[in-house]
């Protein structure tokens, strides 16, 4: 699979509370798990981080139910992930199905799909749905 990158940026208005991951190119479950490992190893998620916005609008997500199950199993075993909100922004219905499943099936994780950055930020900071 050619070219994939994830650009990490702190939110302009809430740099202490929100980290944004912009996914670019082709992305699969291994890329996502590797990204979490990178965040953890480089201590980019600390006690002040309330949520991570996963922006998938610039990527081609290669995921099926099997790889989704693999991802959820990884997320559930990492304590630092269970304590934060995971907002997923996408403009592609085929991609959006996965955060919907995560939101509805995984009560140990705080996952929610969004179509705009503003809605994701409101949910992370204010708990608005």
Image (spheres, rainbow, N blue to C red):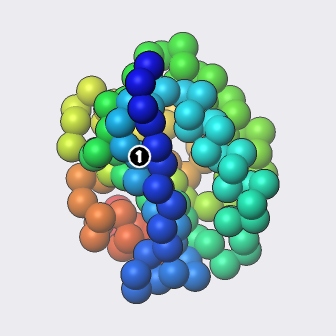
Image location of residue 92, percent across then percent down: 22, 36
- Which residue is located at x 51 percent, y 81 percent? 15
Residue 3 is left or right of residue 95, and the answer is right
- Position above or below: 10 against 66: below
Residue 111 is left or right of residue 50, and the answer is left
Image location of residue 40, percent across then percent down: 74, 55
- Which residue is located at x 65 percent, y 47 percent? 36
- Position above or below: 122 against 15: above
Image location of residue 110, percent across then percent down: 55, 52
Residue, disc 1: 23
- Which residue is located at x 37 percent, y 43 percent? 24
Image location of residue 101, percent across then percent down: 43, 32
- Which residue is located at x 40 percent, y 85 percent? 13
Point out the image quarter for the C terminus: bottom left
Depth order, front residue of 13/102: 13
Residue 58 is left or right of residue 128, and the answer is left
Depth order, front residue of 107/3: 3
Residue 108 visible (yes or no) = no
- Position above or below: 74 against 83: above
Residue 66 visible (yes or no) = yes
- Position above or below: 16 against 110: below
Depth order, front residue of 116/122: 116
């Amino acid at each position: 699979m050619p070219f994939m990158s994830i650009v990490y940026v702190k939110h302009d208005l809430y740099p202490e509370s929100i980290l944004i991951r912009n996914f670019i190119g082709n992305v699969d479950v291994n890329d996502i798990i590797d990204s979490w490992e990178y965040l953890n190893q480089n201590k980019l998620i600390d006690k002040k981080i309330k949520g991570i916005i996963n922006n998938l609008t610039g990527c081609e997500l290669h995921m099926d139910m099997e790889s989704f199950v693999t991802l959820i199993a990884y997320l559930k075993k990492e304590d630092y992930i269970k304590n934060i909100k995971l907002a997923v922004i996408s403009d592609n219905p085929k991609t959006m199905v996965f955060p919907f499943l995560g939101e509805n099936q995984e009560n140990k994780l705080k996952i929610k799909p969004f179509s705009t950055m503003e809605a994701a930020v409101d949910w992370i900071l204010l708990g608005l749905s």
